Amino acid sequence: MIYYADTQITVRDIREDDITALFPWWIDRTLNKHDPRPLPNDPASLIKECESYCDKFKREIMNEDSSLNVYKYFIITNLDDEPIGFINTFSYSENMDDAEMGIFIGDKSYWRKSIASRSMQIVMDHYFNEMNFKRLHIETGETNVSSIGLFEKLGFNKCSEDLEDCGFKYVVMEKLKDRLEG
């Protein structure tokens, strides 16, 4: 399904062949500098990470039984239908009216072009207006200033004390349906 298209980007559902763009972004040190997970640093760990990622992709993102999918991906593409980023949602509430979300622009040539905010607005509108969600929230590293700024621009507010996991500090922000603006 295509959720949005203009003269620069398209936001669509994920396809199996998108894995060839997603995995290199998953292991890119520059793109993941605010993520505490260890990245592969030798051929053996790279192969192991690739196998693990492909398995997770098949089981939790592209499972034939859609009820087993843990993640929903919205792929952002350029006009040639080449992935340049994605928005994903996960950690759904039991009532299916709240989810955590994230955004990732993997193609650095599309940074600072308002693509992230435009794409996020499309996905938020989909969840709030078509799926009747009441809340969307994010967790991001406290040092990820650009991500925090993006979500503030989109009307997200800090909603709890910062979280800490294994020495990594997260900022938690939310947007409520009854506080839709811009």
Image (cartoon, rainbow, N blue to C red):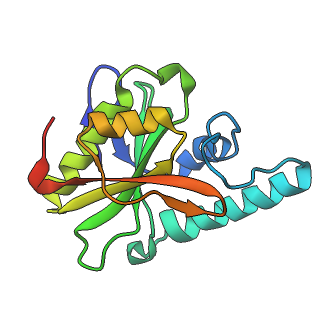
Residue at the extreme bottom of the image, as rendered: 94
- Residue positioned 48% across, 23% down in the render: 111
The part of the image, by quadrant, that contains residue 161 is: bottom left
The part of the image, by quadrant, that contains residue 11 is: top left
Assign the C terminus to one quadrant of the image: top left
Q: Is residue 82 visible?
A: yes
| Relative horizontal placement of residue 7, taking residue 52 as reference (left or right) | left
The part of the image, by quadrant, that contains residue 160 is: bottom left
Report the number of numbered marks: 0
Give x and y (percent) for residue 77: 43, 33
Give x and y (percent) for residue 4: 25, 37
- Residue positioned 90% across, 48% down in the render: 42
| Relative horizontal placement of residue 81, taking residue 58 as reference (left or right) | left
Q: Viewer-proximal residue, 111 or 8?
A: 111
Give x and y (percent) for residue 118: 29, 32
Question: Where 54 sits versus 22, above or below?
Answer: below
| Relative horizontal placement of residue 141, taking residue 136 as reference (left or right) | right
Q: Viewer-proximal residue, 143 or 63?
A: 143
Q: Viewer-proximal residue, 48 or 32?
A: 32
